[in-house]
Image (cartoon, rainbow, N blue to C red):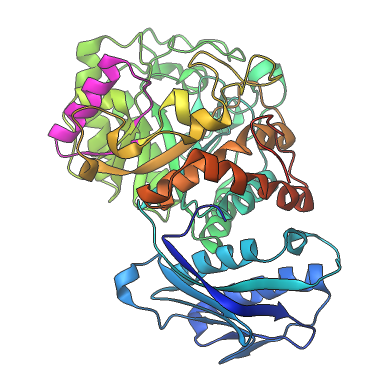
Amino acid sequence: MIPHPATQQPLPDETFTLTPDASIGSTDSAVRTIAERLAAQLRRSTGFGLPVRTGAGTITLSTDGADSLGTEGYELRADSSGVTITGATAEGVFRGVTTLRQLLPAQIEAAGVQDGPWEIAGTTISDAPRYGYRGVMLDVTRHFFTVDQVKRFIELVSRYKINRLHLHLTDDQGWRIQVDSWPRLTEYGGSLQVGGGAGGAYTKADFAEIVRYAGEHYITVVPEIDTPGHTNAALASYPELTADGVAPELYTGTKVGFSSLASGKERTYEFLADVFREVAEQTSGDLVHLGGDEAHVTPHEDYLTFVPKAAQLVVDQGKRVMGWHEIADAPLPAGTIVQYWGTEDEKAQALAVKAVEQGATLVLSPANRAYLDMKYDEDTPLGLQWAGLVSVEQSYDWNPATLIPGVPATAIDGVEAPLWTETLDDLAKVEYMVFPRLPGIAELGWSPESALDWKRYRDRLAGQGPRWEALGVNYHRSAEIDWA
């Protein structure tokens, strides 16, 4: 299983077998939808009827679990009499269901009826996450991805107990989220993508569907509006946001660090107030990401003034601020999460320490470990390598608690694996770069430190191959893994 559960004990001489007369029981309405979705998948692959009923079933889901395991914790027992999954919340039960699916044979994920038997070796599991933030980022600006493609992405990453989807919605190459008060952002600024092809944008209805679908999978969407750099699409749409009032051309290349909002203009902050208000209205979570990275042409003194003003506009909407680690150079509001994307460079590490000294917490996305767009090796046909080559082992074999000198383990909220899409123009390419590395990042976020061991992990990862094949995932068959 991935992530490895906190504790697991075998039940000798016990085997659970899913049979044609099986049923799924939900003891309360909070988990009824989870039960119905589980039944729908199991029906597709087994051909069994699997009625969903109130009360106990062959597989029983319940929110009668202990509060001590937290909102995401669960207990699972599989023996000859059935399977029970209990949590203190529906979210905990959902995490337990993801474990159940991995305990069943890989062909359980198939879209059509398969041969059994559908057996699970007897076991008990008591499980809860190490960190509360376990994220993945999808860049939909360099190349645009449709609602259905994002939903497929959500479905796949949710299997590894990911609970945050960070959507990078604006950049030099495109603006992808509807803002009614500034309509040219999507009408013009979202019209292209890297390479000059047609871009796209999410209407409010589109974005609501992404948020809803993510919520069904107990994933919270974190929207990013990158400022003050990475803003060429906005500047091309509204020249009043530029320093000289002249609109730049739309940009379809991949360079960074050349654009900036006019940080000295009041109109800039009127613009951001409108944008953050409308984005916050579309967001059920408590975070809005304001970017802040690679603002190379923003004068540093202007940047130090800009960040607190932009952050306050987020706070004014009742949201907490999240931003890349550069924002730690400026004063930050209470509750800020700083996302560390550095490698081992001292400047980035110093900013992480400065963030914590201000009372901020950190989400770790070290580019030479967690960036899913880095090439696996020199022969990888996709991706970049400015942060180095990131093998499957390299992405797994690090400890978030000790990554940054001078940062206490208590300041770490969790981990996130970003995927930038300069070279990825379809979902098959996305899957190739995400799998098999994302499950390792997910395990670092969920499993206890004592469970983390590369040699044992690579054997478990090998067992995911048949599962991905059943799901039609275009995963990278790394030579590091002896695929099952």
Q: Is residue 389 above or below residue 26?
A: above
Which residue corresponds to the image point at 40% horizontal and 41% vertical from the top-left?
A: 415
| Residue 221 x, y percent position in the rendering | 47, 49
Which residue is more in the foreground, 75 or 239? 75
Quarter of the view holding residue 458 = top right
Which residue is more in the foreground, 95 or 318? 95
Residue at far front of view: 13
Which residue corresponds to the image point at 28% horizontal and 46% vertical from the top-left?
A: 320
Q: Is residue 346 magenta?
A: yes
Which residue corresponds to the image point at 56% horizontal and 34% vertical from the top-left?
A: 176
Which residue is more in the foreground, 410 or 164? 410
| Residue 297 x, y percent position in the rendering | 35, 8
Quarter of the view holding residue 384 = top right
Residue at far bottom of view: 55
Which residue corresponds to the image point at 60% horizontal and 21% vertical from the top-left?
A: 375
Q: Is residue 14 visible?
A: yes
- Quarter of the picture containing the N terminus is bottom right
Q: Is residue 338 above or below residue 413?
A: above
The residues colored magenta run 340-363
Quarter of the view holding residue 380 = top right
Q: Is residue 197 above or below residue 13?
A: above
| Residue 441 x, y percent position in the rendering | 48, 41
Q: Is residue 1 magenta?
A: no
Q: Is residue 360 left or right of residue 53?
A: left
Q: Is residue 356 above or below residue 35?
A: above
